[in-house]
Image: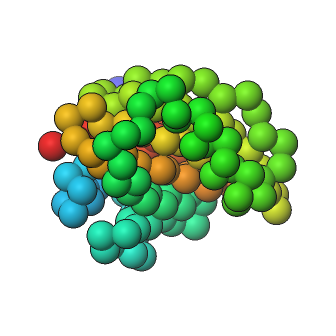
């Protein structure tokens, strides 16, 4: 009987460890604009230059672009996000909401297109003239991972 209970504890421990490593997040940084965020393990960088940072996996893809405009204020963010979502031709765009993400002020909207969901977000860095447009495209089963990414941005 004791050997069964030790075996069960060992299996439970293994499953717990495995589940934590599968959902573990790692830091990813865009050094050009001194911004970082959390992504799931296995994210691959596709583009990393001054105009764009893109990375993803099979279920979640994130693109970031800077808006170098020191005249943008938090009052402009809703307009910027609405224009971007419309330009990207998303369907079923939801009402947006203001967000505070670490040291950024932002605004986001959700939409969908061709069976994929998306979060379109503008982030204003009060410490610099670099502001960001973030688009996270994700499959239905990756919504939690997408929310983790968009809520983890920080500047350094």
Q: Quadrant of the C terminus?
A: top left
Q: Where, by quadrant of the figure, is residue 95 drawn? A: top right
Side of 90 where 77 appears, left or right: left
Front-lying residue, 55 or 96: 96
Q: Nearer the viewer, residue 118 or 93?
A: 93
In front of the other: 36 or 107: 107
Query: Is residue 75 positioned above or below 136 on the image?
Result: above
Furthest residue in direction left, as rendered: 156
| Residue 108 in view of the camera | yes
Counting the numbered discs, the total is 0
- Compared to residue 62, the image places residue 140 above or below, namely above
- Residue 128: quadrant of the picture: top left
Report x, y in % for residue 76: 52, 33
Instruction: Give percent across and percent down for residue 108.
Output: 58, 35
Q: Quadrant of the N terminus?
A: top left
Apparent side of residue 145 relative to residue 22 in the rendered image (left or right): right
Q: Position of residue 111 (x, y in %)?
A: 74, 45
Residue 105 at x, y = what percent? 39, 28
- Report the residue that reaches farthest toward the front: 71
Q: Residue at x 55, y 53 (%)?
A: 135
**77 left or right, relative to 110:** left
């Amino acid at each position: 009987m004791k050997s069964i209970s030790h075996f069960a504890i060992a299996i439970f421990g293994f499953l717990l460890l495995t589940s934590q490593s599968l959902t573990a997040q790692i830091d990813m940084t865009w050094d050009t604009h001194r911004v970082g965020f959390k992504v799931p393990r296995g994210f691959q960088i596709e583009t990393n230059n001054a105009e764009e940072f893109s990375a993803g996996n099979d279920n979640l893809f994130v693109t970031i672009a800077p808006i170098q405009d020191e005249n943008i204020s938090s009052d402009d963010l809703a307009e910027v996000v609405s224009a971007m979502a419309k330009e990207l031709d998303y369907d079923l765009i939801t009402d947006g909401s203001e967000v505070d993400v670490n040291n950024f002020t932002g605004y986001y909207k959700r939409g969908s297109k061709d069976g994929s969901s998306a979060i379109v977000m503008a982030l204003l860095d009060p410490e610099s003239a670099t502001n960001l447009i973030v688009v996270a495209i994700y499959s239905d089963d990756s919504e939690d991972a997408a929310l983790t990414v968009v809520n983890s941005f920080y500047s350094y």
